[in-house]
């Protein structure tokens, strides 16, 4: 649906649009409409690398989600986008609250605090984010999955509004997105890793036992904080799947923790 609106948006702003698959087609002839999956970004990445725009944007089918590609053709994690937009809002509206889900990078909360805002950590999901934003008056909310929520837009999530903020940020910063993003990405992340398991509860309990000497919380699934690294393990609501997200100081630390958790899960499968 973004294809029906974007040309009208770009007619009113000082930016040029290079369109890719803008004609609405509910059969999705080019690729599935899930920008969270890297295989669905291949065509956009190729276009960015060929045409050299300042930013690439991939929307889902109804355009409430968006993922962004920097000028080098490298996708931004949802956490990076959340941190950048939060920073912009806090410069405009100091001391505001900003909501983020618990799978977002620690850099998101650190960015919010450094900008003088109040980070509020929530469960994953549209309904939780909107409820907490309403209760707290938060100016903005972001999720790792590419949902970005705006208080002044009735707390609705809008990929197009997120795009407009990023365009404003880039215009003001005077540096390419590939350079700007670095200050918001101090940690390494695994991305979401899915495990098919016969019994989610059994596997979850086994992982918790293995890490019982560390800081654990149950806000949404199992989150274990090991100091310089952490992970969250959440059961899918609709599939026999556990979803693992890991963050650490470097890729090696992340890989080690992924391997450790994966080994426990596989023993129980």
Image (cartoon, rainbow, N blue to C red):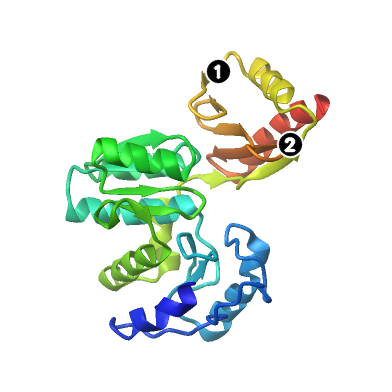
Q: Residues within 10 Å of mark 1 (few under 14, many from 20)?
A: few
Q: Quadrant of residue 196?
A: top right
Q: Which of marks 1 and 2 is in front?
A: 2
Residue at x 55%, y 38% (from the top left corner): 248
Tag shown at residue 214: 1
Instruction: Name the residue at 65% across, 33% down.
Output: 257
Q: In whole angstroms, how far apart are the C-alphas of marks 1 and 2?
A: 27 Å
Left or right, residue 260 beside residue 63: right
| Residue 25 percent across, percent down from the top left | 60, 77
**Which is more toward the observer, 259 or 249?**
259
Residue 109 occupies quadrant: top left
> Residue 222, position in %: x, y?
57, 26
Q: Residue 85 carries which label?
A: none
2, 185: nearer the viewer = 2
Question: On the rendered structure, is 179 left or right of 251?
Answer: left
Residue at (67% x, 24% y) in the render: 204
The residue that label 2 is drawn on is 240
- Quadrant occupied by the C terminus: top right
Task: Name which residue lies at 47% across and 42% down.
Answer: 105
Say which of 265 and 151 sits in front. 151
Q: Position of residue 41 (x, y in %)?
A: 61, 68
Name the spot of residue 65 as percent of width and height, x first.
48, 59
**Local secondary structure at mark 1:** loop
Q: Earlier in the sequence, mark 1 or mark 2?
A: 1
Res 39 quadrant in image: bottom right
Is 70 above or below relative to 100? below
């Amino acid at each position: 649906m973004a294809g029906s609106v974007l040309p009208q948006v770009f007619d009113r702003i000082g930016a040029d649009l290079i369109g890719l698959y803008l004609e609405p087609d509910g059969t999705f002839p080019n690729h599935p409409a899930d920008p969270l999956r890297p295989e669905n970004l291949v065509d956009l990445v190729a276009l960015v690398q060929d045409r050299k725009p300042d930013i690439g944007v991939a929307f889902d089918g109804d355009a409430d989600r968006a993922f962004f590609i920097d000028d080098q053709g490298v996708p931004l994690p949802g956490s990076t986008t959340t941190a950048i937009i939060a920073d912009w809002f806090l410069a405009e509206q100091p001391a505001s609250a900003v909501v983020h889900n618990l799978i977002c990078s620690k850099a998101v909360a650190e960015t919010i605090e450094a900008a003088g805002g109040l980070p509020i950590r929530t469960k994953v999901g549209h309904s939780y984010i909107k409820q907490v934003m309403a209760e707290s008056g938060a100016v903005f909310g972001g999720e790792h999955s590419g949902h970005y929520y705006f208080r002044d837009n009735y707390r609705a999530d809008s990929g197009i509004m997120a795009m407009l903020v990023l365009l404003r940020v880039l215009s003001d910063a005077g540096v390419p997105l590939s350079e700007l993003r670095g200050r918001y990405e101090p940690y390494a992340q695994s991305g979401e890793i899915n495990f098919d398991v016969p019994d989610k509860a059994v596997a979850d309990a086994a992982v918790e036992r293995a890490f019982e000497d560390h800081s654990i919380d149950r806000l949404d699934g199992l989150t274990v904080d090991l100091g310089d690294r952490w992970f969250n393990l959440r059961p899918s609501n609709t599939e026999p799947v556990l979803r693992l997200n890991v963050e650490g100081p470097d890729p090696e630390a992340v890989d080690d923790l992924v391997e450790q958790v994966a080994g426990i899960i596989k023993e129980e499968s």
